[in-house]
């Protein structure tokens, strides 16, 4: 019996989804890991000054590196001449939640489940069901 290409693709997507879910489950057991709403995990790399509160319409200035659980980097602002500035409400939900918990000067590694990232659809080089890992430094809040 031949399996259709579509069935194989669905099987690979399901397998990838399960691998990502298992990765998050294993991360959640580490002592250094803290939890945010919606299954977002983070670990503190460096604590900032504690100043400033990020609001939904804030503009945040950050350096960041986004990668997949495989280690593949899909974006890296440290490779650019200046940090990036974003209006918080224009970012994926997972980053919005995490940045609202950060303070000026904080550096965190954030683990975002696919539901709070790009979901069940592919986004450029990011496969569907991807856990997103961000090393992020919150430089300033405007």
Image (spheres, rainbow, N blue to C red):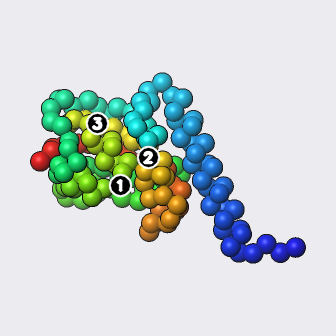
Residue lying at the far left in this picture: please name it: 142
Q: In the image shown, does 1 or 64 lie closer to the viewer?
A: 1
SS label for mark 3:
helix
C-alpha gap between disc 2 and disc 3: 14 Å
In the displayed structure image, the side of residue 50 where residue 98 appears, left or right: right
**Label 1 with label 2: CB-CB less than 8 Å:** yes
Q: Position of residue 126 (x, y in %)?
A: 47, 62
Residue 8 visible in the shown view: yes
| Residue 131 appears left or right of 21 | left
Which is nearer the N-term, disc 2 or disc 3? Answer: 3
Separation of residues labelled 1 and 3 (CA atoms): 15 Å
Sequence order check: which comes first, mark 1 or mark 2? 1
Mark 3 or mark 1, which is nearer the start of the sequence?
1
Q: Which element is circle 2 on?
A: strand
The crowd level at tag 3 (other Cα within 10 Å; few <14, some 14-19, many 20+) is few
Return the residue at label 2.
Answer: 112
Does 48 sit left or right of 65 as displayed? left
Q: Is residue 61 visible?
A: no
In depth, the one of 6 and 81 nearer the eye is: 6
* Residue 59 percent coordinates (x, y): 17, 51
| Label 1 environment density (alpha carbons within 10 Å; few <14, some 14–19, many ≥20) | some
- Indicate the position of residue 98 as horizontal and vertical percent values: 33, 41
Q: Give neighbour class at mark 2: few <14, some 14-19, many 20+ (Cα, 10 Å).
A: many
Badge 1 marks a residue whose secondary structure is loop
Q: CA distance from mark 1 to mark 2?
A: 10 Å
Quadrant, the N terminus: bottom right
The residue identified by callout 1 is: 92
Residue found 22% across the figure and 56% down from its top = 86
Q: Residue 101: which numbered mark, if any? A: 3
- Measured as percent of width and height from the top left, residue 70 is found at 53, 52
Residue 37 found in image quarter: top left
């Amino acid at each position: 019996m031949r399996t259709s290409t579509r069935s194989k693709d669905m099987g690979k997507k399901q397998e990838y989804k399960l691998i990502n879910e298992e990765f998050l489950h294993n991360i959640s057991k580490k002592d250094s890991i803290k939890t945010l709403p919606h299954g977002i995990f983070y670990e503190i790399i460096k604590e900032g000054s504690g100043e400033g509160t990020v609001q939904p319409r804030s503009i945040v200035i950050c350096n960041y590196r986004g990668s997949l659980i495989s280690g593949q980097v899909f974006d890296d602002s440290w490779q650019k001449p200046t940090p990036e500035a974003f209006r918080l409400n224009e970012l994926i939900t997972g980053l919005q939640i995490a940045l609202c918990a950060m303070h000026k000067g904080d550096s965190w590694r954030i683990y975002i489940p696919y539901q709070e990232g790009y979901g069940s659809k592919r986004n450029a080089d990011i496969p569907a069901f991807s856990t997103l890992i961000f090393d992020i430094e919150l430089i300033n809040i405007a």
